[in-house]
Amino acid sequence: MTDPRGVVLETARLRLREFTYDDADFLVALLNDDDFRRNIGDRGVRTAADARRYLDEGPLTAYMAFGYGLWCVEERDGGRAIGICGLLRRDTLPHPDVGYALLPSARGRGYAQEAVTGVLAHARTTLGFPRVVAIVSPGNVESARVLDAVGYHPSTLVVAAPGADAVWLYVPRS
């Protein structure tokens, strides 16, 4: 599924690769962005040690258990880490869901749509998933726009994690 460098897929401008502990400082910045915390949640990651724990409990475990997870999004030109995008498996949803977030400096350039499109194609062609869904917090207009652009629409409100607020379940239009 990944090449020896951990690269999962490439798009015209982006490279998505598996996270490593070397990404800890980047994750501290991304996971503490105000928009991330408001729209996705506070992951309690404040230090590099917290980020390594987050990786152990999330992406690295998912890679081993499922062969997929959240991947680091880098610009192909220069390799700067700008975000996170990938697939999650939640017990509360019937299908894997695509998740994504970008640093503020990378927003507004079409990167989220490009990363999500690449992940959805990878999910279909490489992983063989017939359906991938997405969840979006009510009021997260930017994420709703990305999903609309890739052919998704809101279906119903769901609770994606025990004790969490309801979020919109987005499904493919066709």
Image (cartoon, rainbow, N blue to C red):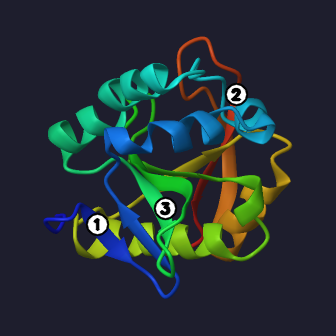
Q: Quadrant of the C terminus?
A: bottom right
Specify the quadrant of the image occupied by residue 90. top left
Q: Is residue 142 left or right of residue 12?
A: right
Q: Residue at x 76, y 61 (%)?
A: 105
For label 2, the SS is loop
Q: Height in image: 158 above or below 99?
A: above
- Going by the numbered disc 1, the residue's amino acid type is Val
Residue 19 at x, y = what percent?
35, 48
Asked whether residue 151 is in view, the answer is no
Numbered tag placed on residue 8 in the rendering: 1
Q: What whole-number distance in Å separates the C-alpha atoms at marks 1 and 2? A: 31 Å
Mark 3 or 2, which is nearer the eye?
Answer: 3
- Going by the numbered disc 2, the residue's amino acid type is Ala
Residue 40 at x, y = what percent?
66, 35
Q: Height in image: 122 above or below 29?
A: below
Query: Do callouts 3 and 2 mark residues in contact (Cβ within 8 Å)?
Result: no
Numbered tag placed on residue 66 in the rendering: none
Query: Do callouts 1 and 2 mark residues in contact (Cβ within 8 Å)?
Result: no
Q: Height in image: 99 above or below 16?
A: above
For label 3, the SS is strand
Q: What whole-number distance in Å separates the C-alpha atoms at marks 3 and 2? A: 27 Å
- Going by the numbered disc 3, the residue's amino acid type is Val
Residue 124 at x, y = what percent?
31, 71
- Please, which residue is most extreme toward the bottom here? 12
The residue that mark 2 highlights is: 166
